[in-house]
Amino acid sequence: MKLHTTARAAVAALMITGCNLAQAHAYPTHEAPGAGATVTSSQKDVAIDFDDGLEPAFSSIAVTNAQGKSVTSSKAAVDPSNRKHMSVALNPLVPGAYTVSWVAVANDGHRTQGHYTFTVK
């Protein structure tokens, strides 16, 4: 009886572990420019790499200046040949602080979001 109970517990533990692995979320692995970075006004885009593939229709990057005004020149795009890479083109930047806000929806539908700042010198 004890062996049967132990076997059931082992199977339950494996099932729980499997469920946790199936619930993937996309988190940034690299940001350019990075959080807290200081860049020049020649910065042309913001690019973020994630640890999981993204759903392009639901993932986005927004970049705003200190007054909250958008400084992107187009909509963010997920690279079709690398669905872990998303970028957005920027209008010409002037010196100041900028905020990057991102939303990443993984292939399995799980959503993550975050934000960070960088400075233009």
Image: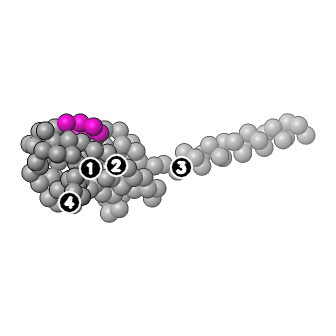
Considering the numbered disc 1 on the image, is that residue within a helix, a strand or a loop? strand
Instruction: Answer whether residue 117 is magenta in the image.
Output: no
Residue where numbered disc 3 is placed = 22
Q: Is residue 77 visible?
A: no
Residue where numbered disc 1 is placed = 99
Q: Position of residue 87 (x, y in %)?
A: 23, 50
Of badges 3 and 2, the one in the foreground is 2
Query: Which residues are drawn in magenta?
Result: 32-38
- The residue lying furthest to the front in this view is 67
Note whether 118 is above or below 23 in the view shown: above
Q: Position of residue 119 (x, y in %)?
A: 20, 41
Amino acid beneath label 2: His
Residue at the (72%, 43%) spot, across then down? 11
Residue where numbered disc 2 is placed = 115
Disc 4 + disc 3, Cβ < 8 Å = no
Residue at the (22%, 48%) spot, across then down? 98
**Quadrant of residue 18 in the image?**
top right
Say which quadrant the N terminus sits in.
top right
Crowdedness of circle 1 by 10 Å Cα count: few (<14), some, many (20+)? some
Disc nearer the start of the sequence (2/4): 4
Considering the numbered disc 3 on the image, is that residue within a helix, a strand or a loop? helix
Residue where numbered disc 4 is placed = 69
Instruction: Answer whether residue 33 is magenta in the image.
Output: yes
Residue 62 placement, left or right of 71:
right
Disc 2 + disc 4, Cβ < 8 Å = no
Disc nearer the start of the sequence (1/4): 4
